[in-house]
Image (spheres, rainbow, N blue to C red):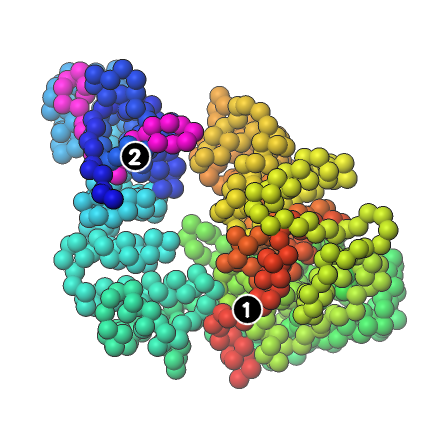
């Protein structure tokens, strides 16, 4: 079958229908001369604006819903050459600082030379009445910002690089992106791991960089270490790293060991035996071990309180009588400088934390509660009745600068630090956490290592527990009331390595757990839509109480499709505000995607849209009674949350949970994912999917594959 020849079309961009700011994927209408109706064009067209003339090369394609489209592979922006064209172009408002009347004055002065003067002799603009130095600088900056996109796209096309990456490159470097591409392309690979080595290498190789160039080999090694970090590893094994880089760079693996030594000499990496660390991960891992060992070397202040007083304080403050086991654990935790409390659902972790807070309060000690996410912090506050913080806010993270306000020179003001959901804390965050501990304080880590590991690198809580250096209090007794729940029973069976019988008949009446067998993703989606729209709302009427979970974003039973389908069923209607391919309407369930300290909303927070204003492009979201406003530029921080990934659900609990599990999810099916999803539901859990997928998840117990040296450092 032959390859179709490239077709060239030229026309004026009459309407910009859609543009994804992350990758610049664009849908637009082009008015071609002598053709009455505009043509629909799709492709990665960064830096284009309505009114510009485009020359596009590509092929025709037929879309089942939208009909014939021109798929552009290569494009050029042709700036207008005639006086009337330049006048219309500048007067369109696309260049900030140039109004229609000012555009007329500039064109009247410079005629056909106008755009060439703005580009190459911008100082001449000050010859125009009303353009002083400040205004001239504003116009120049706006011109360069707008046209930087075009220049970067042109550069990438000329170097045969995927133009889909242009958006990320521009977002990272702004108008200076072209300079980085031309002078230091390998910097892109290190600064933007999502793009990787191949893109940077394509640019560098096109500029004549040799295969064995040391700069190329250094970049390859650093990129591969970043890739390993993305997979959860704190270090790489030297031989494995060299062979992986040899495949990536297409050279002999023996070339890399000398280059590793150079990187070590420049303090970009640290080599210990056969382990290779990025320097910041080495400092973080070693720092955790050193700091914890230092804390353990300091004697714990004696707490003059008897067992009877502990019982009385808890009974008075909480109206709870501690069991003998709980009483013993409370007493022993109080005697530790650093300790871990762990256990599955229904084993009393929360009761224990509340009891400790009550006793420490009686002893007039300052207790601070924290968790890795906003949802986990709020849940901790709800269950303890005490204020809880996110770790990032408590430690004073500055995401712009990459700095932390609290450290050993400016420690936290506390006597006891309780960190819940500690299994979610990665190596870097744990380092900052222990760095901020006052030497006289005690640290209590609370978590369940059977859940999914942290998104960032390391097995921090597991390593701390396995080191034998820190006292671990593993709660195994399931309280009678909790044992009555099939959710809790199934979770503990999975924890203990026994496959639950999800199809067993529960006791008479309604159950808290159901398994609905569906082999095909399409049927899984249909069933979930019916459950959410018709069957569950009578018991869980508030949209925030019901959460659909799925392992993946892609595919029919992934978050992207499920969110679109659920929105259509649960919150249909026209209107709303479009952003990044998502329409936000009043009533929509949404999730915030990144920590925003100004708005005080954090990654994973879930709320509901209460108002949408198309006139000023704003969206108002209610988060547990607090209203937060988003403008059009903020909307990339929001996404629909009718369905979310299991990873995003960590640290949260919901009244009812529906879990989609199909064989299409096989790359991510593992036991800790099944366990994490199951334990998110408080009162109802429904698994919709295939028995085969459930068994595959249970049988895949690869939880210790992450490379981390923390256990060894603590144990030595």
| Left or right side of 372 for 486 | right
Residue under label 1, please give it. 702
Indicate the position of residue 252 as horizontal and vertical percent values: 24, 73
Which corner quadrant of the image does residue 270 belong to?
A: bottom left
Q: Is residue 64 magenta?
A: yes
Name which residue lies at 28% across and 53% down. Answer: 199
Q: Is residue 589 magenta?
A: no
Q: Which residues are magenta?
A: 62-86
| Left or right side of 518 for 634 | left
Q: Is residue 414 or residue 661 the one in the foreground?
A: 661
Name which residue lies at 45% across and 51% down. Answer: 399
- Residue 24's place in the image compared with 500, above or below, is above
- Residue 426's place in the image compared with 132, above or below, is below
Q: Which mark sits nearer the N-terminus, 2 or 1?
A: 2
Find the distance from the CA under tag 2 to the CA under tag 1: 43 Å
Q: Residues within 10 Å of mark 2 (few under 14, many from 20)?
A: many
Q: Is residue 503 in view?
A: yes
Q: Is residue 680 or residue 438 the one in the foreground?
A: 680
Indicate the position of residue 157 as horizontal and vertical percent values: 22, 43
Q: Residues within 10 Å of mark 1 (few under 14, many from 20)?
A: few
In which quadrant will I find the N terminus? Answer: top left
Residue under label 2, please give it. 71
- Residue 517's place in the image compared with 530, above or below, is below
- Residue 16's place in the image compared with 276, above or below, is above
Q: Secondary structure at mark 1?
A: loop
Which corner quadrant of the image does residue 139 belong to?
A: top left
| Left or right side of 6 for 679 | right
Name which residue lies at 58% across and 25% down. Answer: 573
Q: Secondary structure at mark 2?
A: strand
Mark 2 and mark 1 residues within 8 Å of each other at the beta carbon: no
Name which residue lies at 56% across and 82% down. Answer: 715
Q: Is residue 432 in view?
A: no
């Amino acid at each position: 079958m032959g390859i179709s020849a490239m077709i060239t079309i030229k026309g004026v961009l009459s309407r910009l229908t859609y543009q994804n700011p992350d990758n610049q994927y664009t849908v637009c209408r082009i008015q071609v001369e002598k053709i009455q109706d505009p043509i629909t064009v799709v492709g990665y067209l960064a830096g284009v604006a309505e009114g510009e003339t485009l020359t596009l090369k590509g092929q025709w394609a037929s879309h089942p819903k939208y009909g014939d489209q021109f798929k552009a592979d290569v494009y050029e922006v042709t700036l207008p050459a005639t006086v009337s064209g330049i006048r219309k172009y500048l007067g369109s408002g696309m260049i900030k600082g140039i109004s229609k009347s000012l555009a007329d004055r500039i064109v009247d002065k410079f005629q056909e030379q106008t755009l060439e003067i703005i580009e190459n002799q911008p100082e001449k603009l000050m010859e125009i009445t009303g353009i002083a130095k400040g205004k001239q600088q504003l116009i120049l900056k706006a011109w360069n910002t707008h046209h930087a996109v075009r220049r970067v796209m042109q550069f990438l096309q000329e170097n045969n690089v995927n133009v889909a990456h242009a958006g990320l490159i521009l977002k990272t470097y702004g108008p200076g992106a072209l300079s980085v591409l031309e002078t230091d392309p390998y910097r892109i690979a290190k600064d933007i791991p999502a793009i990787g080595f191949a893109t940077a290498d394509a640019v560098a190789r096109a500029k004549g960089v040799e295969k064995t160039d040391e700069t190329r080999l250094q970049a390859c090694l650093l990129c591969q270490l970043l890739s390993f970090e993305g997979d959860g590893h704190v270090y790489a094994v030297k031989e494995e790293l060299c062979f992986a880089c040899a495949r990536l760079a297409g050279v002999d693996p023996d070339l890399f060991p000398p280059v590793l030594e150079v990187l070590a000499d420049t303090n970009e990496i640290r080599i210990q035996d056969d382990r290779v660390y990025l320097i910041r991960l080495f400092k973080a891992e070693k720092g955790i071990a050193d700091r914890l060992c230092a804390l353990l070397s300091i004697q714990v202040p004696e707490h003059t309180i008897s067992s009877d007083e502990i019982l009385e304080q808890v009974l008075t403050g909480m109206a709870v009588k501690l069991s003998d086991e709980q009483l013993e654990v409370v007493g022993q935790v109080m005697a530790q400088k650093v300790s871990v409390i762990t256990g599955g659902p229904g084993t009393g972790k929360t009761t224990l934390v509340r009891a400790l807070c009550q006793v420490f309060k009686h002893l007039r000690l300052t207790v601070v509660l924290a968790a890795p996410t906003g949802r986990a912090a709020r849940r901790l506050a709800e269950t303890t009745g005490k204020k809880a913080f996110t770790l990032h806010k408590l430690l004073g993270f500055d995401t712009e600068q990459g700095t932390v306000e609290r450290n050993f020179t400016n420690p936290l003001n506390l006597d006891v630090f309780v960190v819940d959901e500690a299994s979610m804390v990665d190596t870097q965050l744990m380092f900052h956490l222990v760095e901020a501990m006052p030497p006289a304080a005690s640290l209590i880590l609370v978590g369940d290592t059977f859940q999914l590991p942290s998104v960032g690198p390391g097995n921090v809580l597991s390593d701390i527990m396995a080191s034998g250096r820190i006292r671990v209090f593993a709660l195994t007794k399931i309280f009678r009331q909790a044992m009555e729940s099939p959710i809790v029973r199934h979770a503990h069976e999975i924890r203990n390595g026994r496959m639950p019988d999800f199809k067993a008949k529960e006791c008479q009446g309604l159950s808290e757990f159901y398994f609905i067998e569906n082999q095909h993703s399409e049927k899984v989606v249909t069933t979930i839509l019916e459950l959410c729209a018709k069957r569950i709302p009578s018991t869980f009427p508030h949209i925030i109480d019901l959460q659909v979970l799925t392992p993946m974003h892609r595919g029919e039973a992934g978050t992207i499709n499920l969110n679109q389908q659920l929105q259509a069923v649960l919150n249909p209607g026209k209107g709303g505000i479009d952003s990044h391919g998502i329409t936000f309407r009043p009533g929509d369930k949404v999730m915030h995607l990144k920590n925003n300290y100004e708005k005080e909303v954090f990654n994973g927070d879930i709320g509901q849209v209460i108002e949408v204003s198309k006139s000023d492009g704003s969206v108002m979201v209610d988060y547990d009674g607090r209203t937060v406003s988003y403008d059009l530029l903020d909307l990339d921080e929001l996404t629909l949350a009718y369905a979310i990934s299991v990873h995003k659900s960590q640290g949260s609990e919901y009244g009812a949970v529906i879990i989609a599990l199909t064989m299409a999810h096989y790359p991510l099916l593992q036991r800790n994912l099944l366990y994490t999803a199951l334990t998110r539901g408080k009162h109802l859990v429904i698994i919709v999917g295939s028995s085969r997928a459930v068994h595959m998840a249970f049988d895949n117990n690869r939880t210790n594959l992450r490379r981390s040296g923390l256990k060894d450092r603590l144990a030595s």
